Image: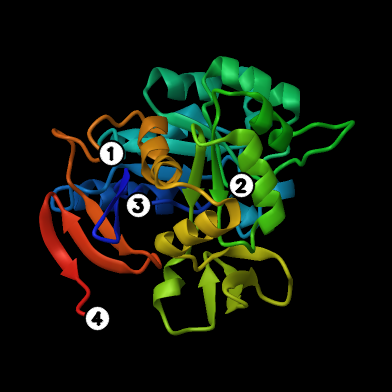
Amino acid sequence: MVTSHNRCLVIQLPSSSPTTLTSDIDSLKSVCNTVSQAKNTTNSLLGIHLEGPYINELYKGAQNENYIREPNINELKELINISNNDIKIVTLAPELDSNMEFISYCKNNNIITSAGHTNATFDDIDLAIKSGLTNITHVHNQMSKYENRNPGVVTASMYYDDLFVECICDLIHVDKNTLKAYYKIIGNNRFMIITDSLSVKHKNIDEFMLYGIHCIKKNNACYIKDTNKLAGSILYMNQALKNMKEVCDLSLIDLAKISSYNQAKSLKLNNIGEIKIGKIADLVLLDNDFNIKYVYKNGKLVYKCWN
């Protein structure tokens, strides 16, 4: 939630969900084990987001095609066990899920499924929703488009009111006018700001490897080297909020819903996402220009900007 007090914005942001890349099973097992151990000392980790490997090669983006494979329930069971039942969300291409059995299994085991890196048709999404699909991963990027005679995921995301939709709000992955039009259609009840940022945003390097893919930082984003294909962002959440405020002229309530409340709701988390008695007090205070001034974890001050 966002409030205004003494010319500051106060935001309650959801805690983090470590996100994987498409990779081999041993690497995914290692991630699951590491996150499970880390939760013993870091209670802000919500759980694991598997972004792949069950995606469509046609829309792989900066995912390594050597490790892309069809949805596999037995493999997921292994990861669930190693993670100590801590797989929270899986991004997949629903059109690869035979009879939507994988999505149904996830629903029955309280795992969110999200359509991403996918060539699904409108009808595929309709069937996936009936089987338990609830989310769309970074809408507009790496998915079937809005087309008049071949409607895909973007069209379905606008039509189905039960879908929560993520959007990378750096004004690079999605043009500002596309963002403005799309938000007008979706509204503040199911739109979710994400950064899709890579860890290199914290590092003073221009080139890096992303699980076997050579990438570079340029023009305020990350790209696959020697191409114009985006590999991810270097966006910070407070800048994303500022972008949405400026592009869509949003109120504080709008910003609250699309930055924290909707995310918590989509993940079925009842103890975060809003400023309220009984909720976890993870708070970020921003000034009117969206600069970070204070950060609280569990109600305790952990950062203060002295400027």
All told, the count of numbered labels is: 4
For disc 3, the neighbor class at 10 Å (few under 14, some 14 to 19, many from 20) is: some
Q: x and y percent of residue 240 in the render?
A: 48, 59
- Identify the residue under disc 1: 274
* Mark 2 or mark 4, earlier in chain: 2
Q: CA distance from mark 2 to mark 3?
A: 17 Å
- Per the image, label 3 sits on a secondary structure element best described as helix
* Mark 1 or mark 4, earlier in chain: 1
Q: Amino acid at mark 1?
A: Glu
Residue placed at 67% from the left, 31% from the top? 158
Q: Is residue 255 above or below residue 245?
A: above
The reply to whether discs 3 and 4 touch (Cβ–Cβ < 8 Å) is no
Considering the image in quadrants, where does the N terminus appear? top left
Q: Amino acid at mark 3?
A: Val
Q: CA distance from mark 2 to mark 1?
A: 37 Å
Residue placed at 45% from the left, 25% from the top? 106
Nearer the viewer's eye, disc 2 or disc 4?
4
Q: Nearer the viewer, residue 58 or 191?
A: 191
Return the residue found at the far left.
300
- Identify the residue under disc 2: 68
Return the residue found at the far right.
149
Q: Is residue 158 left or right of residue 306?
A: right
* Mark 1 or mark 3, earlier in chain: 3
- Identify the residue under disc 3: 31
- Per the image, label 2 sits on a secondary structure element best described as loop
- Per the image, label 4 sits on a secondary structure element best described as loop
- Identify the residue under disc 4: 307
Query: Which quarter of the figure has residue 139?
Result: top right
Q: Is residue 81 left or right of residue 105?
A: left
